[in-house]
Image (cartoon, helix red, strand yellow):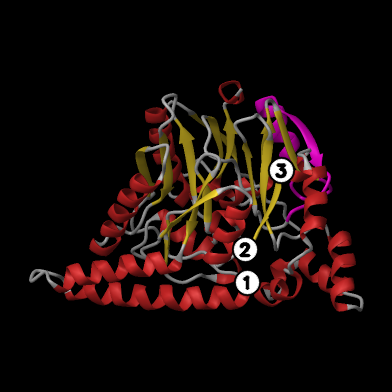
Amino acid sequence: MRVSFKGHDACPIKNIYIATRYNPNAHDFHINNELRNIAGQEGFKIKEFPQGHHPMEWSQDVLTINRKNSLIFINNSPWQNLAMEFGQRFGFKTRPADASFECGNVFLGKKPDGEQFVLVGDQTMMSPDDMLKELNKIHGGDLRKMFAMVAQFHGGNKEAIYNVVRQKVPAEVLKQKAVKAFRIESENVYVVPQTNYHLDTFIRPVGYPYVLVNDPEFALKNLEELAGELSQDPLRSEADFQYLLRLHESTKREAKRLREKYGNSADDVVKYLEAQDFKPIRIGAVYGEGKGETNCCDINFINAFVHKRPDGQLAYITNGTTQNNVDRRLEEMFKKQLGEKAPCGVAKVHFVRGAHNFDNSGLNSISHYLINAGAGIHCEGIEEPDFDALG
């Protein structure tokens, strides 16, 4: 079972740690080069460690740097050796997590008064024994065989397994686990309604109390606006127009599927965050259909690193697109809307693409990640905030 720490609120980034194969033919090679260029522009550093047998696209899921010179990891997991190697290589003290949170759904942040807070998804999975107890209360019977399947899910039907064991767990139970894992006061643990598999596929904190929330209705409106523009353009490409129509239908279909699967909508997320004194910002940022059990869509601008510059402005680093005419316009629309909506200001939006035509599919590396690996740019790296600058 995997622990996933999805990262931090908008903060001054000191380093992003990324695994690499050091192979120019590997899809991560070009992504890492782009990240290095962005880091040079923004004043932070990219630090690399050998990938070995660990999936590079899930680096964020393995460890979290939660305090200065300190990182935590799940205890008794396949990642423990990696955590020790990472700590020795880069000078971190390592601590096993007191509880495990499957599939991410965690954002760490700090309030203006210095209090740390954490956002946790309401369908976050705990350690097998604890989850077994909770599910037995809900369903009755012995689910130990199912957990044995989860432990070896690489050989099983992932979608079927997760549909059974990914359940809403009582918020107070999750809060207690998060308090132990992250050593944060209970009143600063917020259990967010999930509308997708990971928090970082549908929300993105951009500086307390503001949180971007992907709203499929806003995404559909963007596509409809773009369709109107194209219909009035005598020079429009019929291929572009047909692609846009397919993207509209797949985005609409996916929104319906996810609502049925997770039981929550963007409205539920917004209402919850508002009730907890956050200020959610609705935006259209995710397009297309999910692939596999992780439900990663073709285009995802929510999945991002957010670096806070010394002047308080933000640098937003997210997944690029395949860059056909429609995709390019969607990038422009997102950049414009983000600039208008983010109160602290966005100085720059960096779209990371990687190498184009990876494996002759017509896709760039990021698109390959989103469609096939079930991961995006934020899943790839481990953020280290500049804790001195944070105070």
For marks 3 and 2, the one nearer the N-term is 3
Query: Which residue is the site of mark 2?
Result: 194
Magenta stretch holds residue 375: no
185 vs 384, nearest the viewer? 185
Magenta stretch holds residue 80: yes
Q: Marks 3 and 2, Cα distance to the nearest angstrom?
A: 18 Å
74 on left or right of 60: right
- Residue 263 image offset from top left, x and y in percent: 63, 73
Q: Are marks 1 and 3 in contact (CB under 8 Å)?
A: no
142 on left or right of 102: right
78 vs 40, nearest the viewer? 40
302 vs 311, nearest the viewer? 311
Is residue 261 shown to the viewer in this render? yes
360 on left or right of 281: left
- Residue 196 image offset from top left, x and y in percent: 58, 65
Type of amino acid at the residue the image marks with label 1: Tyr
When the figure is inspected, residue 213 is found, relative to residue 38, above or below; the finding is: below
Magenta part of the chain: 75-101
Judge depth for marks 3 and 2 and give the one in front: 3
Q: Secondary structure at mark 3?
A: helix
Q: Which mark is residue 78?
A: none
- For label 2, the crowd category at 10 Å Cα-Cα, with few meaning under 14, some 14 to 19 and many 20 or more, is many
Report which quarter residue 230 is drawn in: bottom left
Query: Which residue is the site of mark 3?
Result: 188
- For label 3, the crowd category at 10 Å Cα-Cα, with few meaning under 14, some 14 to 19 and many 20 or more, is some
Query: Which residue is the site of mark 1?
Result: 262
- Residue 93 image offset from top left, x and y in percent: 76, 28
When the figure is inspected, residue 338 is found, relative to residue 269, above or below; the finding is: above
Q: Are marks 1 and 2 in contact (CB under 8 Å)?
A: yes
When the figure is inspected, residue 241 is found, relative to residue 112, above or below; the finding is: below
